[in-house]
Image (spheres, helix red, strand yellow):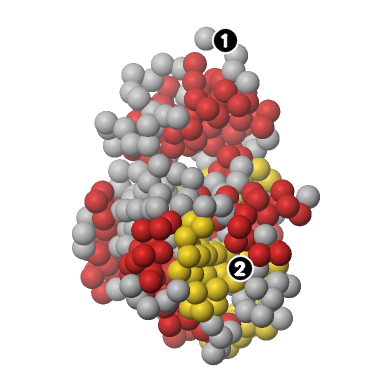
Amino acid sequence: METLTYEEVLDNIENQRRFGHLPGVEVSEQMLKKLGDPQREMPFIHIAGTNGKGSVAAFLCAILREAGLKTGMFISPHLVDFEERIQVNGEMISKEDVTRLGNRLLKEEYEVTPTMFDYCLGMGMLYFREQCCDVVILETGLGGKLDSTNAVGTPVVSVITKIGYDHTEILGTSLAEIAAEKAGIIKKGTRLVTESQKQEAIDVILAVAEKAGVKSCRQVELSEIRDTVYKDGKQEFSYQGYERFTMGLLGKHQYENAAAAILAAEEFFEETGVLYTKEIIREGVKKATWQGRMEVLSEKPYFLVDGAHNSNGVETLAESLKQMFPGEKFHFIMGVMADKDYEKMVECLVPLALDFKTITVEYRRALQAEKLAECIRKKGVQALSETKITDCILPEKLSKEHRTVAFGSLYFIGEIKKLWTEYRS
């Protein structure tokens, strides 16, 4: 096989099938073994959940870096650049390293058929080993028990973020079934941190934890998150023995995501013996950034984007907007996948809506813009389907009187971010 260019490597990897014939965990176990188990000896923090995985990973990465640890982070999907998926100390893997490692991965014979995600994971593990990472934060792709990332072994800390209804055709139709899949990352000897959950979900998680024999189990208590304030584009809060955190990540949900990261960091430090102070954790929370999640792209005109791509995420978006801007109504721009619970998503925002514009996302599973607009109009709100994103997101197209919020699929938010960057450059 001849050496492929960067573009050819990405084309080969990204055009692999989305789901394989075997569970991802089995495929990646085989791949990693063939690659010499590059993940061996690296300590991991493994994160599963329906919403909040990426934000918790971002908070954790910033905290661990503040403690002086060389921190790898594996996330999905990417918003704009493929390289976002694999980062060390907040810096994306280079195109040159993607090309080099991609060629190695594509030339190997694995006796199984890897998906795109399996190739990404293999590339991440090889890169993190080369970079001699002190710790790797690993975000699941889908579920937990059968997810490719579950092939890496026993994590130092397992984190389960908010569980809701998503990918029900694969993970199950009840919260208990979905929780059982997510809880598959819990293993004997790990330390467990979980966000607050519905009773149906937490019962499953705690039962799995007890059966696995975890070293410790801590749950975020919402009553301990206090003094929450939104001011001058920042959020402040206190948690347990910590007073007055400041963070740039916006949204009501980020208080709990930050709390989960704080607990996970404390558990990691205790297990590994890494010395830390409250100031290290405070600074990490303050410095955390996360693209495409309640991200303000422009203040004048005001334009916010959020990757709320299911009803749980949109409920949180609605609550956050009400908290940040009491009494206001918004122009919404929406683009989602056809397999999402989009009617419920719309219902969450109808009380806050001046109107909607809808877009067909450039992805094979996308919901058609006009079908979405029809759904919205039936709810009694004006909706217009647009053929081009640029017809509704460029500054001259945005309202100067009211705030505009674009939300939906991460692919959609990625398209907006790319166009916005090109416009500003």
- Residue drawn at x 49%, y 25% is 12
Q: Is residue 87 above or below residue 213?
A: above
- Outermost residue to the right: 425
Residue picked out by circle 2: 304
Q: Nearer the viewer, residue 317 or 303?
A: 303
The count of marks equals 2
**Amino acid type indicated by mark 2:** Leu
Looking at the rendering, which quadrant does residue 134 occupy? top right
Q: Residue at x 29, y 69 (%)?
A: 202
Return the x and y of residue 278 as percentages of the image width and height. 64, 72
Q: Nearer the viewer, residue 15 or 125?
A: 15
Q: Is residue 75 above or below residue 239?
A: above
Q: Are marks 2 and 1 in contact (CB under 8 Å)?
A: no
Horizontal side of residue 66 vs 79, given as left or right = right
Q: Residue reaching furthest top?
A: 1
Tag 1's secondary structure? loop
Residue at 62% across, 83% down: 230
Cα–Cα span, label 2 and label 1 = 45 Å
Q: Is residue 92 visible?
A: yes
User: Is residue 424 toward the left or the right of residue 216 in the image?
Assistant: right
**Sequence order check, earlier mark of 2 and 1:** 1
Give the x, y percent position of residue 348: 39, 75
Q: Label 1: few (<14), some or many (≥20) within 10 Å? A: few
Can residue 297 be seen in the rendering of this structure? no
Mark 2: give few (<14), some (14-19) or many (20+) Cα within 10 Å: some
Left or right: where 205 falls relative to 137: left
Q: Amino acid at mark 1?
A: Glu
Q: Which residue position is annotated with label 1?
A: 2
- Kind of element beneath mark 2: strand
Q: Nearer the viewer, residue 168 or 181?
A: 168
Residue 77 x/y as whole percent: 50, 47
Number of the front mark, 2 or 1? 2
